[in-house]
Image: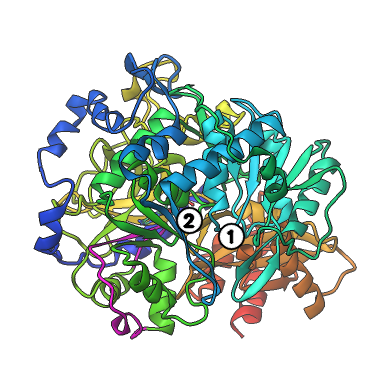
Amino acid sequence: MAEKEIIETSEAEIAVHWQEEGYYHVPLDFIAQANMTDESIYQRFSLENFPNCFKEYADMLDWYEYWTEILDTSDAPCFKWFKGGKINASYNCIDRHLAKNRNKTAIHFVPELEEEKVEHVTYQELWVRVNEMAALLQDFCGLKAGDRVTLHLPMVTELPVTMLACARLGVIHSQVFGGFSGKAAADRILDSGSDFLITMDGYYRGGQLLDHKEKADVACEAAAAAGHKVKKVLIWERYPGKYSAATPLVEGRDFIVNDLLKKYYGQRVEPVRMPAEAPLFLMYTSGTTGKPKGCQHSTGGYLAYVTGTSKYIQDIHPEDVYWCMADIGWITGHSYIVYGPLALCASSVIYEGIPNYPDPGRPWRIAQNLGVNIFHTAPTAIRALRKIGPDEPAKYNYHFKHMTTVGEPIEPEVWKWYYNVVGKGKAAIVDTWWQTENGGFLCSTLPAIKPMKPGSAGPGVPGIHPIIYDDEGKEVPKGAGKAGNICIQNPWPGMFQTIWGDRDRFVRQYFERYCKNPKSKDWRDWPYLTGDAAVQAPDGYYRILGRIDDVINVSGHRLGTKELESAALVVPEVAEAAVVPVADEIKGKVPDLYVALKPGYHPSPELEKRISQALATEIGPIAKPRKVWIVPDMPKTRSGKIMRRVLGSISNKTDVGDVMTLANPEVVEAITKMVQG
Ligand code: WT7
């Protein structure tokens, strides 16, 4: 345990040295039009009014049958929200808007190539496409409520069309980030027990039309090798009517969706009336062990929560053009590109490619051309755009009323560039802290009510009551300037229901540490452990310091160190592997990979390359290490545990501290020499 504690303190200590910044005040013209300007909302959503406060969010939705019990705690900590309610997410995101807004744009699809036409998909057209796809899934695949389907789609309109078609039927979608490998898709197919994989032939990234379908072959092979046969692979064409991948179709298994759909043109599917607590989707995320966890999100609770937070914190109005630059393959995209904005009848932008293609002015051209007025991205993208195109925003004529940052702590310097240069000093900024598990925001300012403070996320959002515990379970008081483990005292509707198929792990990982009584049916006994370290300032704002577990946050995406290490061990020469996070100017953190070889093998540049490639193949290019260091031996404790902390200090060129208690202190010097020269 000693090793782990040292990691925790050092993470926290580094960040606590940051100075608290002063407030920035939100422009008055933002406040004048904001959805939420009533300070009493904090009173309405206080712990005293919990859980009934969340009726306000549920009432933003249309229910077939209104719920009878707001929160059922009988199976704590698997909480059920809006029990007795019947609802359909696809109906709430599409059908209910048709009467007044059928001709309004639901989705602006922006292809990466600038010479290609931007698609403006109206709510009417979205409705038609979702209905036809739902008919296909039902008839051609025989899918029904409760079945799981794995999606491995890029950033194209077909992704929300497929998600909403599943939701229409009550089929649980599990979208795997398009940049992930076929192997990563296979793991998720297996874990969720999906019989079908829905993918696309290709998509553009960095100016290249990638062959994406080859990943489906890898996924099916890997799943088959593990004893699970994917029955059918459905392939959308990036250019309808023209198959664009070099990889051939597998006879009898692979089908082109665009061809199949012809049979379903004009067909309509009644939305299935789902219980509020029926799962809507799975979203896999990395944890402390090698196996990714399928976070199971509910239909009614989740949709209510993302709708409420989209309205009050993203300040989305139906007339807004809203652009979240995240990928729909991550939770941010599910909640704040698809479900939240569409439930509010906004126009949501989907951009296929990378922000700096063909040049770093691209995002601002898109904003100008589409009239985007709400912009949402991550510090890693802001840092990159600031580095490569610091003067670009000034060249374009767009106006953001509101901007969001999400995914990792933002350095105050970077925040100020975002505010002054991207926002031209005229936008409200919210720094939203939350996690895949949470469905929606945990901490953020309410933009028209609270001032902004660079580098701080803000207080808990309405209805979220954070608490910081020290390692002994004592509360760290506000303003103590001391870091601790930030937890949430109460459940909320967007909170995931469980880890798919692994309730024990759900309880162990998120509740065991601070649970007062494991038999309790009272939500007060089940504080939720976020796994982040944080400090709370005297004004109640939280500053998030980073993860306390073995997770590395690369460009705002979570990668488990164990996942990366197991990928390295796929290379036959590798005996041991250890991954450590290294500070990076753009990406926040990048992994350094240390490996020790089996006896009889020798280091070579070729081997380094092969190991690095293994991480890209097993997980995806995002997992590629900054550097592979082949070391003579790993620094180890006497009990044989690899001292990642020591390797981390070497990679980051910080003090390694006392290593004399190690089993092999002499290797530390050898490794330091190798890494630092
Ligand atoms: C982890 C969750 C939720 C969508 C994006 C990532 C870190 C997230 C912030 C923020 C500081 C943040 C935390 C968290 N994080 N947002 N605004 N400030 N840190 O989702 O992959 O589940 O990662 O990202 O460490 O635990 P995720």
Tell me the amino acid under the disc marked 1. Arg
Marked residue nearer the N-terminal end (2 or 1): 2
Using the rendered view, name the quadrant where residue 413 is placed. bottom left
Residue 514 is at least partly visible in this image: no
**Residue 553, image x, y percentages:** 50, 59
Q: Is residue 65 left or right of residue 75?
A: left
Q: Within 10 Å of the Cα at label 2, are there few (<14), some (14-19), or many (20+) other Cα atoms?
A: some
Instruction: Answer left or right for 676 relative to 222.
Output: left
Depth check: 614 or 60 in front? 60
Kindly indicate the quadrant of the structure image that contains residue 627. bottom right
Residue shown at 69%/30% (left/top)? 139
In the rendered structure, which segment of residues is drawn in magenta? 390-410
Residue 665 on the magenta span: no
- SS at badge 1: helix
The residue carrying mark 2 is 7
Total marks drawn? 2
Q: In this rendering, is residue 22 above or below 346?
A: below
Residue at 73 percent across and 54 percent down: it is: 182
Q: Amino acid at mark 2?
A: Ile
* Left or right of residue 485: residue 671: right
Q: Which mark is residue 644?
A: 1
CA–CA distance in space, label 2 to label 1: 9 Å
Q: Is mark 1 within 8 Å of ligand 1?
A: no
Q: Which residue occupies 26% across, 73% down?
A: 416
Farthest residue, direction front = 266
In the rendered image, residue 38, in percent from the top left (x then y), is placed at 10, 43
Q: Position of residue 318 (x, y in %)?
A: 28, 49
